[in-house]
Amino acid sequence: MKSPTFHPPIRRALATAEGTFIAEYTARGLACLDFPTGTAAPADGAADFAVPTVHEWHTLTTRAVHTALAGKTPTQLPPLDLARGTAFQQSVWRELQTIAAGQTRSYGEVAAALGRPKASRAVGGACGANPLPLLIPCHRVLAAAGGLGGFSGGLQWKRRLLQAEGTLPPARLERRLQACERSQRSQRVPPVRR
DNA sequence: AGGCGAGTGAGGA
DNA sequence: TCCTCACTCGCCT
């Protein structure tokens, strides 16, 4: 079902204290939410006003993002366009939305909840494909071994979001994360492993 | 206790 | 069909 046959997605900037997010809307609803990148945000701002619905959706999205950044669960969301995901990914994303703020689960637990106890890695893949971080709380999924796992928007975002929710990142996790970040930084060019 | 490797499920080229 | 991946678990050192 990849035949939009509609206008190209409408991109709009979403300013927060943490930076400017980019929200992308299709005829179905909010389809994508990008973290602030630091680089110039290529959001178009004028043409979209031709679609009043998008304006309403964007208002809801803006409110939801601010709520999420404050560590709370948004009470109201715009319609979400997740049609671009596969069936498995969508089931993962739906499962993620059931995780309350302040709670965390492991990739394995999410996989088990879907009836695929061994699909933890696949869950990670689905999280990585999550087009709506923050609203679909993939940051609440941690590795079972006591790690943070990964985060498409950058691990610093994952940590920040978890802290905002009061989800204690145990000292051990914190140390692990820092070591991880350090090694990632020093290993710009990863050696041939495996 | 920590490191390493194999197994595993799904998506993309 | 093969390769990659935001994982896990168990064995080895």
Image (cartoon, coloured by chain):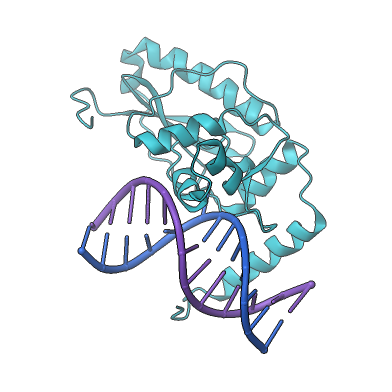
Chain colours: A cyan, B purple, C blue
Of residues C5 and A159, which is closer to you in this image?
C5
Q: Is residue A194 left or right of residue C11?
A: left
Of residues A92 and A17, which is closer to you in this image?
A92
Of residues A65 and A175, which is closer to you in this image?
A175
Query: Could you tell me residue A65's position as x and y percent?
Result: 58, 28
Residue appearing at x 58%, y 70% in the figure: A185
Query: Could you tell me residue B3's position as x and y percent?
Result: 64, 79
Query: Could you tell me residue A8's position as x and y percent?
Result: 25, 28
Q: Residue furthest right?
A: A171
Q: Is residue A28 left or right of residue A143?
A: left
Q: Is residue A131 above or below residue A156?
A: above
Q: Is residue A22 visible?
A: no
Residue appearing at x 53%, y 19% in the figure: A77
Query: Could you tell me residue A150's position as x and y percent?
Result: 56, 54
Q: How many marks?
A: 0
Residue appearing at x 67%, y 58% in the figure: A145
- Look at the image and tell me in which quarter the C terminus of chain A lies: bottom left
